[in-house]
Amino acid sequence: MIYRDYGKTGKKVSVIGFGGMRFGKDEDYSAEVVRKANELGINYFDTAPFYCNDRSEFIFGRAFKKMPSQYYVATKSSVRKEDTADKVRWRIENSLERMGIDKINFFHMWCIMDLQQYQKVMEPGGAYEGALKAKAEGLIDHLVFSTHCKGEDIRKIIEDNVFEGVLLGYNVINHPYRQEGVDAAIEKNIGVVTMNPLGGGLIPRNEEFFSFIRERDGENSSQAALRFNAAQKGITVVLAGMGTIEEVEENIEVVKHPLIVSENKVKEIKSKIGEELNSLCTTCGYCLKCPKKIDIHNYLEAYNLMILDGKEAMEKHLKWLKETGSIKEDAQPKACIACGACEELCTQKLPIIERLNEISAVMK
Ligand code: SF4
Ligand code: SF4
């Protein structure tokens, strides 16, 4: 394993971090997966309330009782739900209890979507104040933030010097969109953890399409995507969601080879990722607050296929979604009332309404 300095915190963290959002139903086995990762050198474990139907922190708690080696824990409070100092305090105590630990090493103000939300976090009596107090009392080591903002807004937050690190969505597809945030983090020497290195599963689900990112003999596109992130200047940890021991081993394999991307490959990748690839839905599901109960992420995944492979591929996928009951009969795109709630929440800032209209036309 390769370890890197997390900014100025004095902590050395594994370049591959464990993302705790892909556990299956068997909690004993999931805890075993966490311990196996730790045994193989991973020491950065990222969780959050609500991951895996709110079971993730409990699973880590189980694993932490018998961890083979030293480790760091990262968890979060939602900037939407825990929007006051008191609520954040409650969340911190809750997470500590669930995981059976007495300190959170990296505590995230979770999912800052824009500067307005950031300002709300920083208001007197707000989330930041609550977390700062908990830090002063020794319940938190480092206060950091997670964001889906565009690069220039991430820069503005970093330049306020209130956080010791950032967790951001960054991958081979969307990296130009967030690069300015990484550059700002380098200038301020703070930690950078990347989430979504596989584009929310888009890369493994379209293995052949993304074969252009592979460079080393024998690697698959997912491994190439992890290597791409780990090779970028300023990136401290690449979070990979892991649910099985096989996935842990596959991810660890990446660091057994040089973490570099050749100049030619960078050029090739840049020439292939245009605006269109940056505008793929990662199926993260953050937008699913639709008053009409439309399965937006499933429809937008079908739209991804149109971007990647043309209209026919989208039609085929829509048919499959219908056959498998993945989309509700009574909540089709035509039911959209264009209220805009989903677009406000979308981590990729996608024109969801416009896409649903297009899909609706195809479905007719
Ligand atoms: S804009 Fe349409 S899809 Fe989005 S939340 Fe509103 S009704 Fe649902
Ligand atoms: S539309 Fe946006 S928020 Fe919704 S699943 Fe796709 S990327 Fe995520």
Image: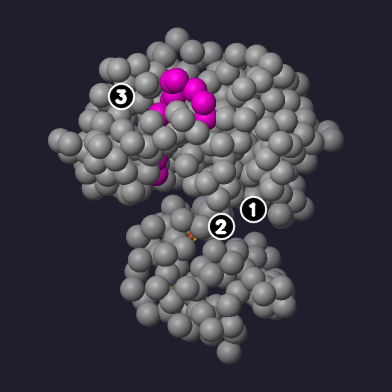
Mark 3 — residue?
134
Residue in view at x 56 percent, y 36 percent:
58
Q: Amino acid at mark 1?
A: Leu
**Is the C-beta of the residue carrying label 2 under 8 Å from the nearest atom of ligand 2?**
yes
In the image, residue 270 lies in the stretch drawn in magenta: no
Give the CA distance from mark 1 to mark 3. Answer: 38 Å
Total marks in image: 3
**Is the C-beta of the residue carrying label 3 under 8 Å from the nearest atom of ligand 2?**
no
Q: Secondary structure at mark 3?
A: helix
Residue in view at x 35 percent, y 25 percent:
143
Q: Main secondary structure of the magenta part?
A: strand
Q: Quadrant of the C terminus?
A: bottom right
Q: Earlier in the sequence, mark 1 or mark 3?
A: 3
Mark 1 — residue?
202
Q: Amino acid at mark 2?
A: Thr
Bounds of the magenta segment: 99-111
Q: 108 or 164: which is nearer to us? A: 108
Give the CA distance from mark 1 to mark 2. Answer: 8 Å
> Marks 1 and 2: CB-CB under 8 Å?
yes
> Marks 1 and 3: CB-CB under 8 Å?
no
- Visible residue check, residue 227: no
Q: Find the residue positioned furthest to the right.
A: 218
Q: Is residue 76 left or right of residue 82?
A: right
Mark 2 — residue?
283
Across and down, in percent, residue 272 comes to 62, 50
Q: Secondary structure at mark 2?
A: loop
Q: Amino acid at mark 3?
A: Ala
